[in-house]
Image (cartoon, rainbow, N blue to C red):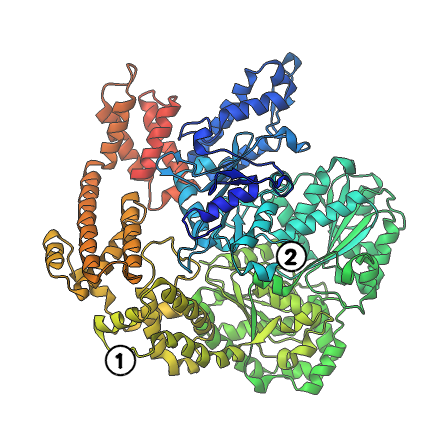
Amino acid sequence: MSFNELNSVENYIIKQLTGVNLNANEVSEDAVLYGRFWQYKSPQELQRSTNEVLIESDLKAALIRLNPAITKNPDLADEVIYKLRAILISVHQVGLVRANEEFFKWLQGDKTMPFGENNRHVPVRLIDFEELKNNDFIATTQFRIHHRETKIPDVVLFINGIPVVIGEAKTPIRPSVSWLDGAHEVHDIYENAVSQLFVPNVFSFATEGKELYYGAIRTPLDYWAPWRLENDEDAIAKRLGLGEVGKELSDLLHPKRVLDILQNFSLFTTNKKKQRIKIIPRFQQYEGANKIVDRVKEGKIKKGLLWHFQGSGKSLLMVFAAQKLRREKDLKSPTVIVLVDRTDLDTQITGTFNAADISNVETTDNIKQLQTLLENDTRKIIISMIFKFRDAKPNMNTRENIIVLVDEAHRTQEGDLGRQMRAALPNAFLFGLTGTPVNKADKNTFWAFGAEEDEGGYMSRYTFHDSIRDNATLPLHFEPRLVDVHVDKETLDKAFAEFKESTALTDEEADALNKKSAKMAAFLKSPERVAKIGKDIATHFKEKVAPHGFKAMIVTPDRYACVQYKEELDKYFPVEASRVVFSTSANDKLDFKQKWGIDKGQQEKIVDEFNDALSDLQFIIVTAKLLTGFDAPILQTMYLDKSIKDHTLLQAICRTNRLYPEKSFGRIVDYFGVFDDAAKALQFDEESIQTVISNLSELRDKLPKTMKETLSHFIGVDRTLDGFEGLEAAQNAIHNNDKKDAFAKDYKYLSKLWESLSPDTILNLYQEDYKWLSQVFESVRPAADNIGKLLWFSLGAETTKLIHENVHVGEVHHLDEFILDADVIEDIFNNPDPKSAKKLEKLLIKRFKKNAGNPKFKSLSERLEELRDQAEQGLITSIEFVKELCKLAKETVEAEKELEELLIEKTPKAALTELFIELKTDKTPAVVERIVEDIDAIVRIVRFDGWQKTSSGEREVQKSLRKALLKYKLHKDQILFERAYAYIKEYY
């Protein structure tokens, strides 16, 4: 099969799912491979009009088939369909996530209707989750849907007439086109233009045939994830082209998988900004949670150890597992106990469960309470702390359907907690989750959780390299600073020996340890040393962290050092820029407690403020608190001045590895000397851990070679040439798409290096070359916003600053002087001069970008891309190119004139007047003009820029509209309200 025609990937998807080869119009005989679940229907065969989301005939048939009450009275199916239509229509008022959440209650079978005897409420089933054969699975392509605009997604999958999966296929017509371009189309265009189509959506996917990525509604593209198969030996073959993505496709889109994600792995939660969001699992969370559930259902092996690297989403894995275990009918309402290892982790886990609205969750503070719950045979999700089991009595509950999920399981080796847990719950299932690998020496941990049947002792592994590959976490770099303040090697070895690694110390224990080692404490906290480090932190932060909008954490030897660092930082930053976070105890002096003590509520406020990008708080200063279980994606740099190693060190440094916009790595600035011997600091059997963190100086060594490779695309080009000629010479060196994309790939790596090292003095040597390359990169970026998003990325803060400091090449910004009108176009047409044509081409690109959302300009932009491709491949002469370009320019001028006239005609008031006249009935008041005046006046008072993107803005405008309609007794006309609101959203 040839994969160079435009629809190749789309047809490949359909063949994988249904066995139908659309290229040859034949059906594959391999029924085993395709399972014959998905049936292909062309868009013309679907019984629907273009503005209908549901295939109502299929849905009605399923309702009659799956619900005995509706089987008896098929007309009742219409009542359900009316309810579902109302949710689809409501999307413009309540927003996509809330509409999706409401529709999911119907999809999951949680809704009832009074269809039973004597109007008794009975559950309504839209889907049969038990018996797949009782459902209709339809796959279609080029699905035309019209609401305010017409859109045509490539692939849509229906279950019982409900569109549950949307897919966008991109054929790599140029090397830079990737899954990201398809995902951009789904997330940024379709979800906004035809949002009703996404109200029943389980997830969407995008592929260019090499990689398959998927995401839930409103999931930012950075958080779309790859779907992988566990132990897939074909990973290398997959890199070679199209054939291999089929395995992932068949696996992710198998009806069983889609329905499992719909029923058990879709969470609706509230984020820090109080916005409702939807979360679906990454593949390692899905696979890990299902392994736990399957092992419990089989009932043979009573334990399991899961190692998923720090930051890859263990809290959510536990939520998914707990939720699915509670829903499993075979387990007869089990008790799920989630055990955490300290109070701040408790807050994070409890917060994750609460924010996701998981029902029947109970938190216990002491063993007595836990014991009472277990003795009373409570069937809920119980969250407690590992250390409560120190006082547990044997045989607290001997029931078999108790499942214990232990977070940071390596801690259980202390005091033999694993054995105490097993004695207290002799027949329970014990699963240990850890973000750091467990050393073979930790025999207690393996005894408690590692099953002999599991290879290497782990039932599920998701390593550091896996998480970096999948962009689930970021790489970590360390930067040794002020080597003269590092602790000498002999003292360091002694410190590591004294530090009991078996547990992370509490704040008070850290103080006690420092008292023990008085000599070291005196050295670490000497005022001269702290002053020197404080000044260096201020310099480093202002140069390397603040310009990118990130924040930092300072880790100090003990609580008194926290105070020292706070006082030092106040010399360089406002007082509100830093806060200390530690516990105080009954033994502390009153004035110390009053000045520095904070309670749980205050700590939560500080953490929320730290996570808020707009707040003044830039630093959190800690000694033991917040080193584990603290999730702040905005934290990019940790200033480390404390003796920690192994598990605690790995957990601590991984505070910086969470994903955040524009963040490409986490940084550890080492003042203590922990990484002077990285191998000693991270002693694990698992060798891959040695490569978890790399020295920033290694990046410095890579810069010369990377610069040389990137410049090699322009051999023979005079980089001293100023003006447009200099830029044109560079563009001619990379004159076709393959060369442009090869350059973009090298430049992308160079740019990451540059942003990471900035403002290192080594960059001064290469500044002119880098500036030149950056301007070339900007000038050849594709015109259309949805081409090559993975390679043609947005430039980082330092690079942008550098470009705009002193533009001496290309003078791209002077293009506006080149007026686009009929005479100019005519002149170029009659005198085809390459320089003028180049200017005209640049100007057209600028115009197309300005009107990116307009279908007419999008089509003109695509024609320009085709024209450029033809010229690059030598299919047309340069004169033909100029003449075709002029034709395009004429059409662009015409399109702009039409748009201008339309905008003059369609003022907001004109649009509303048109609407009211269209919907006018005998009951509508005659004075349409006055109604429009009132609506216009009241909406203008409450609207603000970007109001359509905020729930409060939408709410205020809807309220104002209702108020205006109430005056004329039109407030009950729902169709009028919805249409008027849609117009207001578009024109105000």
Which quadrant of the view contains residue 133? top right
Residue at the spot 74% in from the left edge and 82% down from the top edge: 494
Mark 2 vs mark 1, foreground winner is 2
Task: Tell me where residue 917 appears, x and y as whole percent.
Answer: 25, 23
Q: Helix, strand or loop at disc 1?
A: loop
Q: Residues within 10 Å of mark 1 (few under 14, many from 20)?
A: few
Task: Tell me where residue 744 appears, x and y as whole percent.
Answer: 40, 66
Look at the numbered discs 2 and 1 and tell me whether their residues touch, using CB distance below 8 Å.
no
Nearer to the camera, 915 or 258: 258
Which quadrant of the view contains residue 916? top left
Task: Tell me where residue 754 appears, x and y as whole percent.
Answer: 43, 73
940 versus 652 height, above or below: above
- Whether residue 627 is visible: no
33 relative to 835 in the view: left or right: right
443 relative to 976 in the view: left or right: right
Task: Tell me where residue 265 appears, x and y as whole percent.
Answer: 62, 43
Q: Quadrant of the C terminus?
A: top left
The CA span between labels 2 and 1 is: 51 Å
Amino acid at the residue labelled 1? Thr
Mark 2 = which residue?
232
Mark 1 = which residue?
720
